[in-house]
Amino acid sequence: MLDRDGFRPNVGIILLNQRSQVFWGKRIRTHSWQFPQGGIDRGENPEQAMFRELHEEVGLHPQHVQVLARTRDWLRYEVPDRFIRRDARGHYKGQKQIWFLLQLVGHDWDLNLRATNHPEFDAWRWNDYWVPLDVVVEFKRGVYEMALTELSRFVPRCEFRFDARPEQRNRYLRGGLHQRDLACQPGDVGPSAPENAMSSFVGRQGVPFELPPGGTFEPDPQTSFGLDASVKKI
């Protein structure tokens, strides 16, 4: 289902744990990582599509999460021709997305990447909030930055301490965001959080890495996170 401009309606999901880290999934049989996302079916509204995708891709049900916020408007990205099936070129242009910010109120073990017969991910991990901007495939980066920025004020309120260690600054922090470490207060959420409460997270390696039953992970020695920008065709 495409709109008149060639964009497919879609939802994106930013799922937080109690430390305000974000869920990051490895697409099955690739080295490409991303947030959960999926198309809106005919007759669905964005929230219905979000809960369906949440179960299909991550195995969670509505009782496992709290909806904190959503983006006001559609966010669009164009898909390069080399990632579009040949028969779709010329009329399919990309995705337009409504993004949802969710708080996990269940447990890590509630996540199930094999909830359906067509899994999207075969591995997952928790990342600090801004890390995905450095590792997501290039053509999605603008939408990720807009969604993370718009929704950041709804992330659980955190206490800050300034940290000027230059070796921990990624290119987005150097681009104008203030660098800070965060110590989050569980349960303190909502739009009352200060506007700059999520101005940046320091990206760090060594975040606990989880594999589902039967999942595998082969690090890429060419990158610091074991990631690359490969994506499968849409």
Image (tube, rainbow, N blue to C red):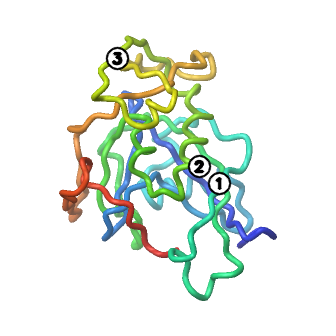
**Mark-to-mark CA distance, 1 and 2:** 9 Å
- Residue matched to label 1: 97
**Secondary structure type for disc 1:** strand
Query: Alpha carbon of mark 3 to alpha carbon of mark 2: how far?
Result: 28 Å
Q: Residue at x 64, y 82 (%)?
A: 89
Which quarter of the rendering shows the N terminus? bottom right
Instruction: Please give the residue where the numbered disc 2 appears in the rendered image.
Output: 143
Residue 103 relative to residue 195: left or right? left
Say whether disc 3 or disc 2 marks the residue closer to the N-terminus: 2
Residue at figure coordinates x 67%, y 41% from the top left:
71
Instruction: Say the numbered circle drawn on residue 164.
Output: 3
Label 3 close to label 2 by CB (< 8 Å): no
Measure the alpha-carbon separation of dots 1 and 3. 35 Å
Looking at the picture, which amino acid does disc 3 mark? Ala
Question: Please, is residue 207 above or below residue 114 in the view?
Answer: above
Secondary structure under tag 2 reads helix
Q: Of residues 109 and 31, which is closer to you in this image?
A: 31
Residue 26 image position (x, y, % from top left): 34, 58
Q: Residue at x 64, y 40 (%)?
A: 70
Quadrant for residue 109, please give it. top left
Tag 1–tag 2 contact (CB < 8 Å): yes
> Which amino acid, mark 1?
Gln
The residue lying toward the viewer, choosing from 78 and 111, is 78
Residue lying at the far bottom in this picture: please name it: 87
**Residue 100 position within the rendered picture, expressed as x and y whole percent measured from the top left:** 59, 43
